[in-house]
Amino acid sequence: MTDLVRPPAPSSSSPSLVRMMHNLNVYCPYHTRGGLAKPRDQDEASGSDQPASKRLRVESECCDWQGSYTDLLAKHLSECPFHLIPCPHGCGESLRRKDVEGHAPTCASNYQDCPICREKVRMGQMDAHRSERAELHVRILEGKLSEKEVDGSDDMLSDVLKRVTELELFCKKLLLHMKARSDELKQCMKAQSDELKQRFS
């Protein structure tokens, strides 16, 4: 669909041209499919050899508005159901005004993620979604709770193993220290024994 390109406003220095432009009787730019309409006299004189049912389908996809150039710019384009407008939800698509309502159910920006099941939910329908998916949400939350409990048990076990390892290292150091002290005592006692033997020999 060809979008309308608005012509520049006539200069205020030519009031007759301004009046002529504003009083000009025109069709809507979406009067025909694929672009601007033909002049009205040519359009009416051309006729058509298409079947009536086919012409009806084509015409139903076109805007039948006609009026002054002033009304076209001042009012009609802001109401025309065939005029292209950006998606009001902000998804970035351009669509005909008449298609906005049909676009809403599939618009990527008209949804929000459920914080529990991550399902996409239409804006304003979160309470209804939670009621409908209550059982599923309970199962998901129970699963997450079990995972946390398992994670907590793993953390506790890791902490116990760490403490046991530290205790083993401490015991080894203590045994080495006690062995060293025992060797020192043995040497001291042997020296004293040798000294006593020398005195009484």
Image (spheres, rainbow, N blue to C red):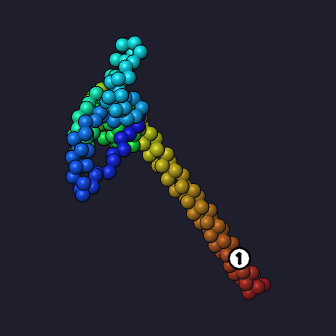
Give x and y (percent) for residue 178: 62, 68
Residue drawn 74% across and 87% down?
Answer: 199
Q: In this view, does 75 lie to the left or right of 35?
A: left
Q: Disc 1 on helix, strand or loop? A: helix
Residue drawn 37% across and 35% down?
Answer: 36
Give x and y (percent) for residue 171: 58, 61
What residue would you read off at disc 1? Answer: 187
Q: Give 186 or 86, whichever is nearer the viewer.
A: 86
Residue drawn 25% across and 39% down?
Answer: 24
Q: Which amino acid does label 1 sit on?
A: Gln
Give x and y (percent) for residue 83: 32, 36
- How many residues crowd around disc 1 within 10 Å: few (fewer than 14), some, or many (20 or more)? few
> As drawn, which residue projects farthest toward the right?
201
Task: Give the quadrant of residue 100.
Answer: top left
Task: Give the quadrant of residue 41.
Answer: top left
Q: Give 29 or 165, whichever is nearer the viewer.
A: 29
Vertical side of 175 occupied by 31: above or below:
above
